[in-house]
Image (tube, helix red, strand yellow):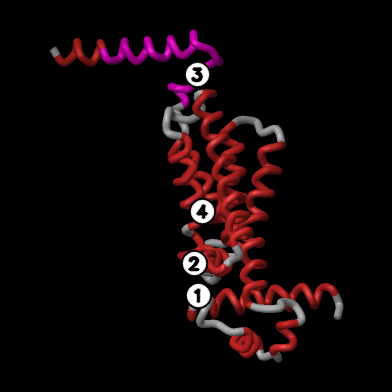
Amino acid sequence: MPKIKANAMREAILDAASTLFIEHGFSGTSMYDIANALGVTRTAVYYYFKNKEAILVALTQSVTSVPATGASRGREKSAPDPMEELRDLVRYHAKRVLSHPLQFRVVERAEINLPARLRESGRASRRSLLNKFTAVIEQGVRSGHFRVIDARIAAFAMIGMCNWTAWWYKPAGRRNPDEISEMLAEYALHALKRDDARRPRKAGVGEAVRLLREDLSYLEQQIHDGT
C-alpha cells in the first residue's frame, strides 16, 4: 500500500473514531462501529490498530506530545522580546488544537481509559507546556513588558483559551485556524502587556525606583487636587 494512502487511511480511522468516541463514549464504541462508519471491513481497521485502546493512544500522542515538543522548539530560539515569544507560544498551541479539535476533545474525556504510563506521559506533556508559558510570562514581568501578575495563573488562562477552541471551532465558520490563532495571540498580549508609558526604559533597581516615584508623585497630585 502506498505510504501516502496508508497515512490517509490511518488519519481517517482516527477521525472516525474521534467522532464516535464523542457521540457514544469510548466504552460505547467498538472496532466494528469504526469500520462501519468508514465503510470498510474490520480487518482494514485492525491492519492499522490492534484495538480501540491503541487508537486512543495514537490520539493522545497526536494532541499532547507534539504541542509540548513544538513549544520547546519555540523557546530554544532567540525571540526579540517576551511579547513575541508569548505570541509564538499561543499561536502554536492554538493551531495544534484547531488542527485536531475532535481528537483533542476525545483525549480530554477519555484519558481515564489510557494505561497508567501513558496517562502520566500526557500529564507530563501538559505540565511541560504550562511551564513554557509560565516561564515566558515571568520573563515578561521581569523585563517590564507585562504587568505584575501571577504568571502561573495567567499561563493557565492562556492555555485554557486555546484549548476551548476545540469545543466551539467549526471548519465551515467565518474564521480559519490561522486567523483564530492570530486573534488569540493578540488577546493574550493585550491582557498582559504593560502600557508603553509604564514600561521600564532600562533594567535594574534604579529604574524600578524611578517608576515607583512617578506613581507616588501621581498619587500625591491626586490627593492634593482632591483636598
Residue wearing tag 3: 200
Number of other residues with Cα within 10 Å of mark 4, as a class: few under 14, some 14 to 19, many 20 or more? many
Residue 66 in the image: x percent, y percent?
A: 67, 55
- Of residues 227 and 82, the one nearer the viewer is 82
Q: Please provide the residue range marked out in magenta.
A: 196-219
Choose top left, top right, bottom left or bottom right for residue 76. Answer: top right
Task: Check the image and name the residue furthest to the left.
Answer: 227
Residue wearing tag 1: 22
Residue 70 in the image: x percent, y percent?
A: 68, 49
Query: Does residue 77 lie above or below 5 as drawn?
Result: above
- Of residues 82 and 153, the one nearer the viewer is 153
Judge depth for marks 2 and 1 and give the one in front: 2
For marks 1 and 4 on the same chain, the one whose residue lies earlier in the sequence: 1
Residue 140 seen? yes
Residue wearing tag 2: 109
**In percent of the image, x 71 and y 43: which residue is there?**
73
Residue 178 seen? no
Relative placement, left or right, of 175 versus 215 is right
Choose top left, top right, bottom left or bottom right for residue 87. Answer: top right
**In percent of the image, x 42 and y 14: which residue is there?**
211
Task: Check the image and name the residue furthest to the right.
Answer: 2
Q: Secondary structure at mark 3?
A: loop
Query: Does residue 52 lie above or below 140 as drawn?
Result: below
For marks 4 and 2 on the same chain, the one whose residue lies earlier in the sequence: 2
